[in-house]
Image: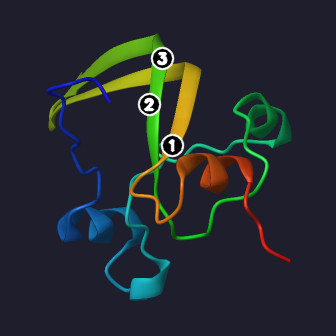
Amino acid sequence: MPQGEKLTSLKLEKKSKKELVGVDAPMGEREEYPYGTRIRLEEEQLTKLGIKGLPDVGGNLMVYGKASVASASENKTDKGSMRSVELQITELALMAEKPSKPAADVLYGGDKKA
């Protein structure tokens, strides 16, 4: 991560969750993060990134990337204005957040004991 930059949580506030799924939705069905903040990497991208073993579900990875702005818009209505930006990720790097073992082992599947 570039020096001096800080991470900002994109987690939905409780009010936003209710607006998105309705008040009656069970807690387990409410998403914690808004639509469009999840990325999916398929086999080809995992191979390009050099990832051999899959990370643990629920674990954390640091993501560093470059994106081009695909679109930017502002929509003004009688209820206010809404802005949006679509980003196309063009370059990406992944690294272990705080590895308990060397990052290369976590990301590249090394040092596995049978």
Q: Are marks 2 and 3 in contact (CB under 8 Å)?
A: no
Identity of the residue drawn at 28% across and 22% down: 75
Give the amino acid type for the residue marked by disc 1 in the picture.
Met
Foreground: 34 or 99? 99
Look at the numbered disc 1 and give the secondary structure of its residue. Answer: strand
Q: CA distance from mark 2 to mark 1?
A: 8 Å
Q: Is residue 73 left or right of residue 9?
A: right
Pointer 3 local density, CA inside 10 Å: few below 14, some 14–19, many at least 20:
few
Position in image of residue 20 (x %, y %): 37, 62
Which residue is depicted at the point 46% across and 38% down? 63
Query: What residue sits 34% from the left and 16% below the top?
Result: 73
- Residue 110 sits in which quadrant? bottom right
What label does residue 72 carry, if any? none
Instruction: Tell me the amino acid under the disc marked 2.
Output: Tyr
Q: In the drawing, what numbered circle is on residue 95? A: 1
Residue 85 in the image, given as x and y percentages of width and height:
38, 22
Visible residue check, residue 25? no
Q: In front: mark 3 or mark 1?
A: 1
Real-space Cα distance between discs 3 and 1? Answer: 18 Å
Secondary structure under badge 2?
A: strand
Of mark 3 and mark 1, the one earlier in the sequence is: 3
Identify the residue under disc 3: 67
Above or below for 46 versus 84: below
Location of residue 55 with respect to 18 vertically, above or below: above
Q: Which residue is mark 2?
A: 64
Q: Are circles 2 and 1 on residues that touch, CB within 8 Å?
A: yes
Q: Say which of 57 and 38 sits in front.
A: 57
- Name the kind of residue labelled 3 in the image: Ala
Would you identify the image quadrant in which residue 74 lies? top left
Kindly identify the residue that appears in the image at 48 percent across and 17 percent down: 67
Give x and y (percent) for residue 76: 21, 23
